[in-house]
């Protein structure tokens, strides 16, 4: 092989390599963004279903199942207690005393803001029907609420829950 034929082959290999790399770079640049998955924002309906899950947990009568809906560092400002609950043990304690009243919540008015793919706020008014464990007599507590949700480890949890009796009720 002559020096000249080696140079021609080296030039062909170099040009081919540059073109191939350039093509790959172009493919990667154009294909990249199309394949990236952007976190999806949840719908208001999906966030509303989180309340339904909480309400269903109430129906189990198990305070630990209700507390499972809350993040470990959640804050609960409960409807029928003056004590602010700031950890799992305190939240379980609240529901141990609240659940014997067989609460059933029904939203009256709701406003949901989906903040991003991992957080949302649900605020409004609900009626909570309570049944006296001794007499069986039912009463309805009209209250306003705020739930702040965060998606942690792939699971939606309540990080802040405020519920208070309507002041004019």
Image (cartoon, rainbow, N blue to C red):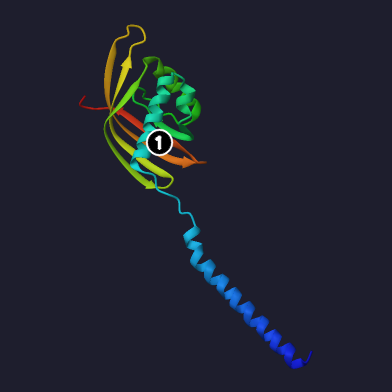
Residue for badge 1: 160
Q: Quadrant of the N terminus?
A: bottom right
Q: Does residue 78 lie above or below 110 as drawn?
A: above
Which residue shows up at 31% across the image and 36% down it? 123
Which residue shows up at 36% across the image and 15% down it? 101
Seen from the viewer's position, the closer of residues 151 and 83 is: 151
Q: Does residue 114 lie above or below 10 as drawn?
A: above
Percent x, y of residue 108: 25, 30
Would you identify the image quadrant in which residue 76 lies? top left
Q: How many residues crowd around disc 1 within 10 Å: few (fewer than 14), some, or many (20 or more)?
A: some
Seen from the viewer's position, the closer of residues 58 and 10 is: 10
Q: Is residue 14 left or right of residue 119?
A: right
Percent x, y of residue 103: 35, 20
Question: Secondary structure under badge 1?
Answer: strand
Would you identify the image quadrant in which residue 13 lies? bottom right
Q: Quadrant of the C terminus?
A: top left
Which residue shows up at 41% across the image and 39% down it? 149
Seen from the viewer's position, the closer of residues 76 and 42 is: 42
Would you identify the image quadrant in which residue 43 lies? top left
Which residue shows up at 76% across the image and 92% down it? 3
Q: How many marks?
A: 1
Percent x, y of residue 97: 42, 17
**Residue found farthest to the left:** 168
Percent x, y of residue 107: 29, 29
**Residue found farthest to the top:** 135
Q: Is residue 4 left or right of residue 38?
A: right
Q: Is residue 27 left or right of residue 43?
A: right
């Amino acid at each position: 092989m002559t020096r000249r034929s080696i140079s021609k082959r080296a030039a062909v290999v170099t040009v081919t390599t540059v073109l191939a790399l350039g093509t790959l770079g172009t493919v990667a640049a154009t294909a990249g963004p199309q394949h990236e998955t952007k976190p999806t924002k949840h719908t208001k309906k999906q966030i509303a279903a989180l309340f339904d899950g909480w309400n269903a947990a109430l129906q189990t009568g198990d305070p630990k199942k209700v507390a499972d809906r809350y993040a470990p560092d959640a804050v609960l400002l409960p409807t029928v207690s003056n004590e602010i609950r700031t950890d799992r043990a305190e939240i379980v304690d609240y529901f141990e005393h609240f659940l014997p009243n067989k609460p059933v919540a029904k939203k009256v008015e709701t406003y949901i803001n989906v903040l991003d793919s991992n957080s949302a706020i649900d605020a409004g008014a609900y009626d909570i029907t309570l049944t006296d464990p001794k007499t069986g007599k039912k009463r309805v507590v009209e209250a306003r609420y705020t739930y702040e949700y965060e998606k942690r480890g792939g699971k939606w949890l309540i990080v802040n829950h405020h519920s208070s009796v309507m002041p004019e009720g």
